[in-house]
């Protein structure tokens, strides 16, 4: 049975966080109720001093099972976007705002459910710890959940994508669509256009990184 919200414990963030330490500690997190239905917590992965950090919403079904971020269908879209924009995934730190998979069981399938705002807030200390360790020069927020968690509820992807945000989290903080939204586009033409816009945003980030090397 899910514990009441007021009974949840603070996230067990190590006093001196390292990426390896965070990956171990997140398995003990009981700051919200999502741990109870998930296989495991999924922290970010990538270079410890990556200049670019990408932040999505939460692990999906494949990520929950395998324990790595962006390895499912949305990860395939992200890989293509990075490749087409000239960014190597090995040079990027990739993570999510929420570290446990929220879903609704439908037969044998687990259908993605957007995390509630309080669950996002409960999980934010993990992302803040990752930011403190990696200290990226550029931070790209993928989709509305990540963007609103770190830049405020007034942010809108369609209006604000690629616009530099006023933030002290990194020298450049901006946002773009989540790769999964490209997969959900209703037709082939719409998916192509969405992918082109996504790659254009990433190319702009790549150009910024090259100019600020």
Image (cartoon, rainbow, N blue to C red):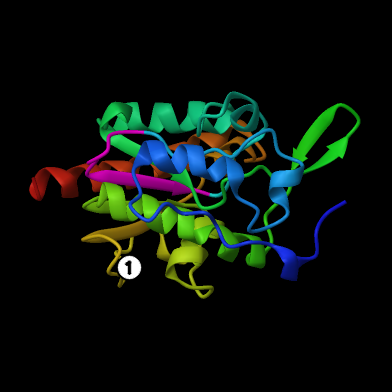
Q: Nearer the viewer, residue 102 or 22?
A: 22
How many labels, in total? 1
- Which corner quadrant holds the C terminus? top left
Q: Secondary structure at mark 1?
A: loop
Q: Residue 180: image x %, image y %?
A: 58, 40
Q: Residue lying at the far right in this picture: please name it.
A: 107
Report the magenta residues as a range. 46-56
Left or right of 160 in this view: 207: left
In the figure, residue 166 lies in which quadrant?
bottom left
Left or right of 135 in this view: 122: right
The structure residue drawn at horizontal position 65% and vertical position 61%, both measured from the top left corner, is: 119
Q: Residue lying at the far front in this picture: please name it.
A: 15
Determine which residue is flagged by label 1: 165
54 magenta-colored: yes
Q: Residue 105: image x %, image y %?
A: 85, 38
Rendered view: 115 above or below 91 = below
The structure residue drawn at horizontal position 77% and vertical position 39%, both measured from the top left corner, is: 111
Label 1 packing within 10 angstroms: few (<14), some (14-19), many (20+): some
The structure residue drawn at horizontal position 27% and vertical position 41%, both measured from the top left corner, is: 203
Rendered view: 127 above or below 203 = below
Q: Nearer the viewer, residue 190 or 195?
A: 195
Left or right of 159 in this view: 27: right
In the figure, residue 184 lies in which quadrant?
top right
The structure residue drawn at horizontal position 32% and vertical position 43%, both measured from the top left corner, is: 202
114 magenta-colored: no
Does the rendering let one see residue 193?
Answer: no
Q: Residue 199: image x %, image y %?
A: 36, 39
Does the rendering let one see residue 57?
Answer: yes
Q: Residue 135: image x %, image y %?
A: 25, 52
Rendered view: 6 above or below 49 = below
């Amino acid at each position: 049975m899910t514990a009441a919200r007021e009974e949840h414990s603070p996230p067990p963030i190590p006093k001196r966080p390292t990426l390896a330490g965070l990956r171990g500690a997140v398995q003990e997190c009981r700051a919200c109720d999502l741990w109870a239905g998930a296989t495991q917590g999924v922290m970010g992965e990538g270079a410890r001093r990556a200049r670019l950090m990408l932040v999505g919403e939460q692990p999906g079904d494949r990520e929950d099972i395998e324990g790595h971020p962006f390895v499912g269908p949305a990860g395939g879209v992200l890989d293509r976007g990075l490749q087409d924009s000239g960014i190597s995934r090995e040079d990027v730190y990739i993570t999510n705002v929420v570290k446990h998979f929220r879903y609704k069981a439908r037969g044998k399938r687990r259908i993605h459910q957007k995390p509630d705002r309080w669950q996002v807030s409960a999980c934010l200390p993990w992302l803040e710890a990752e930011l403190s360790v990696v200290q990226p020069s550029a931070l790209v927020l993928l989709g509305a959940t990540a963007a609103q968690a770190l830049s405020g509820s007034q942010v809108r992807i369609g209006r604000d994508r690629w616009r530099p945000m006023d933030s002290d989290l990194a020298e450049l903080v901006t946002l773009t669509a989540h790769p999964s939204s490209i997969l959900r586009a209703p037709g082939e033409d719409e998916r192509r256009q969405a992918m082109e816009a996504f790659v254009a945003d990433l190319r702009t980030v790549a150009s910024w990184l090259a100019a600020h090397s």
